[in-house]
């Protein structure tokens, strides 16, 4: 993968709408908040959680930050990649719900991480809210190296409420395993892990 492709992927992953502190509550109006759960490609466990916060997190993850674009591999299933459509024959998106946010996408030699709740701890990406906030604000995740692909320089502008909402949504989704765990990708072909993956 050449440098231009990596820059294009990183730029597409950084399409983000940030809300200034204090304005998040206004921006997360009832219609936007209700839309959050409607657009989630997976079921959400709301037990013991603030529904409005989880809904807002889903809206940010699925309609604004495009976390799925880098953290789900393959993002779309065979025959359901909307980018393969034309003006005459559009293709309806068929998201890879079984591996949603499970990671496994290669950006050069870097592989995207699993954002879903860890089976042992139940924590998204096995991070506490404080660790997740640090990753979003400074690019320092669970690894000792700086997150160079994730667009944290943009995400750091999100309000505390926005980051907490994303974390709550990630806490409420099902655990997923990645299709792929190596770069370059190497995994068996199946209906939910098509290999080769649909082109991106």
Image: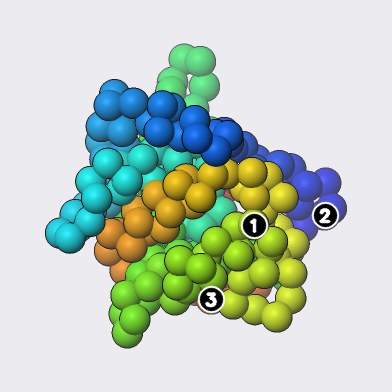
Q: Of marks 3 and 2, which one's residue comes earlier in the chain?
A: 2
Q: Residues within 10 Å of mark 1 (few under 14, many from 20)?
A: many
Residue 79 or 100: which is nearer the viewer? 100
Give the image's coloring scheme: rainbow
Q: Are marks 3 and 1 in contact (CB under 8 Å)?
A: no
The residue lying at 55 percent from left, 38 percent from top is 21
Discs 3, 2 touching: Cβ within 8 Å:
no
Look at mark 2 in the image and give the residue it sits on: 2
Does the image show residue 174? yes
Disc 3, SS: loop
Quarter of the C terminus within the rendering: top right
Position of 9 compared to 114: left or right?
right
At label 3, counting other C-alpha atoms closer than 10 Å, the crowd grade (few under 14, some 14-19, many 20 or more) is: some
Q: Is residue 7 left or right of residue 158?
A: right
For mark 3, what is the residue? 181
* Res 62 → quadrant: top left
Name the disc covering residue 137, or none.
1
Q: Nearer the viewer, residue 59 or 91?
A: 59
Q: How many marks?
A: 3
Q: Foreground mark, 3 or 1?
A: 1
Q: Earlier in the sequence, mark 3 or mark 1?
A: 1
Residue at 34% x, 26% y is: 29
The image quadrant that residue 14 belongs to is top right
């Amino acid at each position: 993968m050449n440098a231009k492709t990596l820059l294009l992927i990183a730029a597409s992953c950084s399409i983000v709408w940030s809300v200034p502190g204090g304005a998040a509550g206004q921006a997360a109006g009832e219609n936007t908040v209700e839309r959050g759960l409607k657009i989630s490609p997976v079921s959400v466990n709301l037990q013991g959680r603030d529904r409005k916060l989880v809904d807002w997190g889903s809206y940010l993850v699925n309609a604004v930050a495009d976390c799925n674009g880098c953290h789900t591999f393959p993002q779309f299933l065979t025959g359901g990649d909307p980018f393969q459509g034309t003006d005459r024959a559009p293709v309806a998106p068929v998201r890879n719900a079984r591996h949603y946010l499970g990671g496994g996408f290669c950006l050069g030699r870097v592989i995207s991480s699993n954002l879903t709740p860890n089976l042992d701890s139940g924590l998204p990406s096995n991070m506490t809210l404080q660790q997740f906030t640090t990753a979003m604000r400074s690019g320092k995740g669970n690894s000792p190296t700086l997150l160079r692909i994730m667009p944290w320089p943009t995400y750091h502008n999100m309000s505390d409420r926005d980051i907490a909402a994303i974390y709550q949504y990630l806490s409420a989704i099902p655990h997923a395993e990645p299709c792929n765990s190596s770069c370059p990708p190497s995994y068996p072909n199946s209906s939910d892990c098509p290999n080769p993956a649909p082109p991106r």
